[in-house]
Image (cartoon, coloured by chain):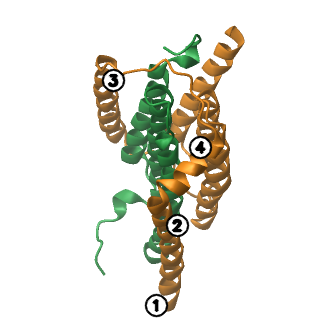
Chain colours: A orange, B green
Amino acid sequence: MIFADAIFIIIVLVTLAGALMTVLSGSIIYALMGLVTTMFGIAGLYVYLNAPFLAMMQILIYVGAISVLIAFAIMLIGPLYKRPKEWSYPLKLIAAAVVALFSFFMFAKVMLKAQWAVLSKPFAISTKDIGRLLFDRLTFPFELISLLIVVAIIGAVMLSLYSRGEK
Amino acid sequence: MTGMGLYNNLNIYLFVGLALLACGILGVIYRRTLVSMLISIELIMNGAGLNLVAFNRFVAPENAYGMAFTLFIMGIAAAEAAIALAIIILILRRYRHVEGAKLKEMKD
């Protein structure tokens, strides 16, 4: 139990460090590396939440697809060594920190005050149950997601085609 | 709580999701380029997915709606990243920069 707790604390710290690196680093590619670190940490948290299928999907989709997409965009927007640092002026940092800390403490107060009805049942949802739920009850939203992704692909292709045509 | 151990505590997962939300808000306001703002939005979406799975695990453990919604969030995030990056490349071709504060005009 102590060993599992230690691994859990390490995963939480890795997730938080990745999030801070994402928002505070001066270069975009370091921010992307921080995002990848955060994704791996969240995948570990999904494993601790008895959801190994979601951990797998997290690594496949976020680390495998979205991060590579963002890396391609970073490569397309020009050389990194010529760019200025990612930071805006420091007054904006103070304003952003005030907004972020305000929302953090407000939601933390709400969260600690609420009494969640935590059940003591064992949690035994397998991947088969998720699949049955997706194809029995949530069939219509599932198909809507696929339609959304098709529309997004066609939209991205059309955007790049039109911008090339008018140049 | 269900069982022993530090990881069987709902509030820890909620705090991690909340920290991701706060970091995402900080990044959206503070970062300079549009790509970094997109990365921060991905952080916020991940925090939301973590919250949904944690509530599914601790509050409603008999069905899997939270996990299904997290899968939907992943699909929506993929579509959103594709469209947003296409728009960013378009802005780069037209204005030669991708800085959010310099985009004053959104008309032709």
The chain to which mark 1 is attached is A
Image-based side of B1 in relation to A130, left or right: left
Q: Circle 1 sits on which residue?
A: A166
Which residue is label 2 attached to? A146
Task: Indicate the chain on which mark 3 is placed.
Answer: A
User: Do we see residue B70 in this rendering?
Assistant: yes
Please identify the quarter of the rendering in which residue A7 is found: top right
Rounded to the nearest whole Å, what is the CA distance between mark 2 and mark 4?
20 Å
The Cα–Cα distance between marks 3 and 4, rounded to whole angstroms, is 30 Å
Q: Is residue B80 visible?
A: no
Q: CA distance from mark 3 to mark 2?
A: 34 Å
In this view, the mark in front (1 or 2): 2
Q: Are marks 4 and 1 on the same chain?
A: yes
Label 1 in the same subunit as label 3 = yes
- At label 4, counting other C-alpha atoms closer than 10 Å, the crowd grade (few under 14, some 14-19, many 20 or more) is few
Question: Where residue B45 sits: x, y (%)?
Answer: 46, 46
In this view, the residue in front, B84 or A48, is: A48
Which residue, given by chain and number where applicable, does mark 4 sit on?
Answer: A129
Instruction: Tell me the SS state at disc 4.
Output: helix
Return the disc, 4 or 1, that comes first in the chain's sequence. Answer: 4
- Few, some or many residues within 10 Å of mark 1 (<14, 14–19, 20+): few
First of labels 3, 2 by sequence position: 3
Residue A112 x %, y %: 33, 18
